[in-house]
Image (tube, rainbow, N blue to C red):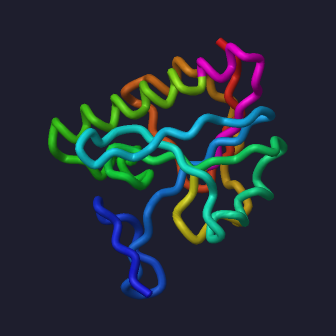
Amino acid sequence: MELSCPVGGQQVEGNLNMCLAIYIASDKLLPLIEWKEEHPGFNTRSLSKYDRGVKKQFTLPFIIYAGSYQGCSCGFLKEFLIEIKDLEMAQADYNLLAEYLREHQKMGSNVEIYSCWEGDQEAQPEFIEQLTLEEVCDPQFQFKEKAYYKIMRS
């Protein structure tokens, strides 16, 4: 099986290119945002059968996958983006993610994020950090691989 990542992803096990995966967990249901090819941007979806192993990373029960303007989460990888337009779209997705989480926190929800390469959903986190929504919006911020983030209230 060959998975192709729009921005190159990570080369693993020979020729397999992998996408970044961003997951959001909460103690309350998270709203889904449909991917729209004609207006690409931040989107969320329910976990697929393939994603379910990521549940072990979280202390909170409701988990969704977060995508970028590229559909998958790879648009959150700023280091691979060369074109100004792509960097602007990536930053817009970070800003939309922060606003999405802010609205959810206003309802009293707690939020966690886990980021990893596809296939590493069950891997032990290499980074455990607390993060504010202001930090998520910082143009220098980028999600790390195999990283667990507790999102702090601003």
Residue 40 placed where, x, y %?
30, 42
Residue 25 placed where, x, y %?
71, 41
Quadrant in which the C terminus appears = top right
- Say which of 29 and 19 sits in front: 29
Residue 82 placed where, x, y %?
19, 47
Residue 92 placed where, x, y %?
34, 29
- Say which of 44 and 91 sits in front: 44
Q: Quadrant of the rendered structure where residue 43 is?
A: top left
The residue lying at 41 percent from left, 38 percent from top is 42
**Residue 7 in magenta stretch:** no
**Residue 108 in magenta stretch:** yes
Looking at the image, residue 17 lies above or below residue 137: below
Q: Which residues are magenta?
A: 102-114
Q: Quadrant of the rendered structure where residue 3 is?
A: bottom left
The residue lying at 76 percent from left, 56 percent from top is 55
The residue lying at 76 percent from left, 53 percent from top is 57
Quadrant in which the N terminus appears = bottom left
Looking at the image, residue 30 lies above or below residue 7: above
Q: Report the number of discs.
A: 0
Q: Quadrant of the rendered structure where residue 113 is?
A: top right
Q: Is residue 13 left or right of residue 26?
A: left
Q: Is residue 10 left or right of residue 124?
A: left
